[in-house]
Amino acid sequence: MSDNTKVALVTGAGTGIGRATALALSRENYAVVLAGRRIELLEETASLASDWDGHMLTVPSDVSDPRSVSELFNNINSAFQRLDLLFNNAGLSTPAVPLEDLSIEKWRQVLEVNLTGSFLCTQEAFRIMKTQQPRGGRIINNGSVSSQVPRPHSAAYTTAKHGMTGLTRSTALDGRKYRIACGQIDIGNADTDMTEKMKKGILQADNSISPEPTMSVNNVARAVVQMAALPLDANILFMTIMATNMPLVGRG
């Protein structure tokens, strides 16, 4: 790895948006740290990099566990001694459940992974980015369009993603003095395992069931790379990328 190679961490890198983004960053000559719960999926992501020559590091991690997150960043420090980009992408959803039937266990699990996990990774990234030379870095949060509007029966996921917006704004403000930029990408209907059901039909606000269009995860990866490519004196604070005809705007 050359001295001017940038280092990126992608959480949830074993599948979907995380995998596509990790591979896109690799093509832009980043050394990429792949974090996720299942080592076999992380290794599969690494194997898909056409010119992989050791510039991908796989670290099985649970972002909701502070000790696991600390170990993840210790690995990054040991391997690269710096971090230029954090993509807080790891997340999970729950089946559509009426708010009054949502278990406290599921509520806590979604909040811990989708929001607390991003907070823990952001804390550790700050500790590296503010002390490294050259100083600073960039954090990109996966907000989802659920940070803007809810779907029916999605109280935990929607709450976590609205919380992500608050975390993004606070990170952008608190990071200024350290040359740490933070932005959020709100994604609508990327074609992943999570959205596969949309092709067959999904619950709408009027209680009808309708299919929804999806888009390739590669479009999301390109957008993240665009955000990451800016110099640290410029920042895309919020970006929305979505399947053009999904029912996000208008009456649906």
Image (cartoon, helix red, strand yellow):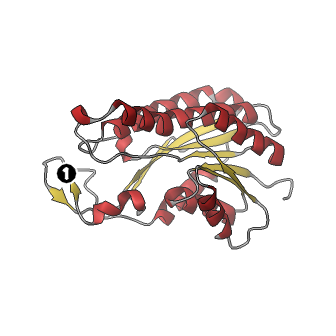
Residue 81 percent across, percent down from the top left? 82, 43
Q: Going by the image, does 249 lie left or right of 60?
A: left
Residue 82 percent across, percent down from the top left? 78, 43
Can residue 244 be seen here? no
Q: Secondary structure at mark 1?
A: loop
Label 1 Cα crowd, 10 Å radius (few <14 / some 14-19 / many 20+): some
Residue 80 percent across, percent down from the top left? 81, 48
Q: Nearer the viewer, residue 183 or 17?
A: 17
**Residue displayed at 49% across by 60% down:** 16
| Residue at the farthest right position | 3
Question: With respect to residue 100, does 11 lie above or below?
Answer: below
**Which residue is the site of mark 1?**
204
Q: Nearer the viewer, residue 46 or 81?
A: 46
Residue 225 percent across, percent down from the top left? 59, 57
**Residue displayed at 44% across by 36% down:** 109
**Residue displayed at 55% across by 36% down:** 64
Quarter in which the N terminus is drawn: bottom right
Question: With respect to residue 189, does 159 lie above or below?
Answer: above
Q: Going by the image, does 117 lie left or right of 153?
A: right
Amino acid type, label 1: Gln
Can residue 207 be seen here? yes
Q: Going by the image, does 171 lie left or right of 196?
A: right
**Residue displayed at 68% across by 62% down:** 26
Looking at the image, how many numbered discs can be counted on the residues?
1
| Residue at the farthest bottom position | 50
